[in-house]
Amino acid sequence: MAAKSKKSGTREIIETLVLALVLAFVIRTFVFESYQVQGTSMKPTLENGDRVLVNKLAFVFGKPKTGEIVVFKSPVNPSQDWIKRVIGVPGDTVSVKNNVVYINGKRYPEPFLKYRHSIPVAPRYVPKGYLWVEGDNRPVSYDSRYFGLLPEKNLRGQAFVIWWPFAAFRWLP
C-alpha cells in the first residue's frame, strides 16, 4: 500500500509540473509576454533594458488608442519587434510643425516628452487598418515620420507595465 501512495504522489507532482508548463506556454503564447526595451527611442518613458509586460489580447477585443504604448513587428526589419507610442489612429490626420504634433489640426498634448526636436511632417491621413506611431525621444526615434504608416496587423500587443528593474515598476498609459 505504501508503494502505491508513493507512486501516486510522484505522478501527482509530474502532472502538476506538466499542467504548469502547459499553462505557462498558453499564457505566454496567447495572453501576456515580456519584452525588453532595446535602445533609447522611448526615453524618458522607457529606458534601455527596461522589461515590460505586453497584453497580446488587447487588440483582439479592442482597437489601439492614441497615447497607448505598443509593441509591433518592425515594418523595416520583420525579425525585430519595436516599441512606440500610438499617435494617430484610423480617421486621424497627423502632422508635425515646429516640433509639435497636431492631430486633426489640434495640438496633441505630450507631457511625457523631454526631447521634442522633430522633423516636420505634412498632414498625413491615417486610413483604416493603419496607425501612426512615434517614439517619445523624437530626435533619435525611427518611427512613422520615417517609415510611414504602421499596418495594424503588425501589432503584437499593448505594453501596460514596466516590471523590471523593480525600482522602475509602474503602470503605463
Image: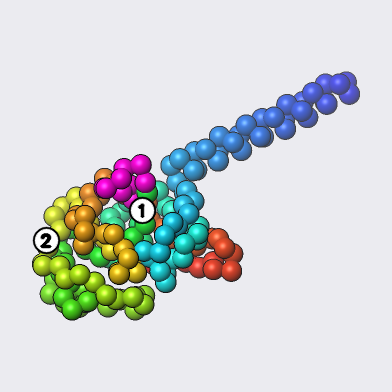
- Locate the C terminus and report the quarter of the image it occupies: bottom left
Q: Specify the label residue 100 is tagged with.
A: none
Colour scheme employed for the rendering of this structure: rainbow
Is residue 57 shown in magenta?
Answer: no
Identify the amino acid type marked 1. Answer: Trp
Pointer 1 residue = 82
Q: Is residue 63 visible?
A: yes
- Give coordinates of residue 138: x percent, y percent: 30, 69
- Give coordinates of residue 115: x percent, y percent: 33, 75
Left or right: residue 91 compared with residue 141: left
Question: Would you place residue 62 above or below residue 141 in this image?
Answer: above
Looking at the image, which residue is at 73% across and 26% down? Answer: 11
View extreme (right): residue:
2
Identify the amino acid type marked 2. Answer: Tyr
Q: Which stretch appears magenta?
A: 71-80
Q: Specify the label residue 125 is tagged with.
A: 2
- Give coordinates of residue 105: x percent, y percent: 12, 74
**Depth order, front residue of 97/27:** 97
Question: Would you place residue 127 above or below residue 7 in this image?
Answer: below
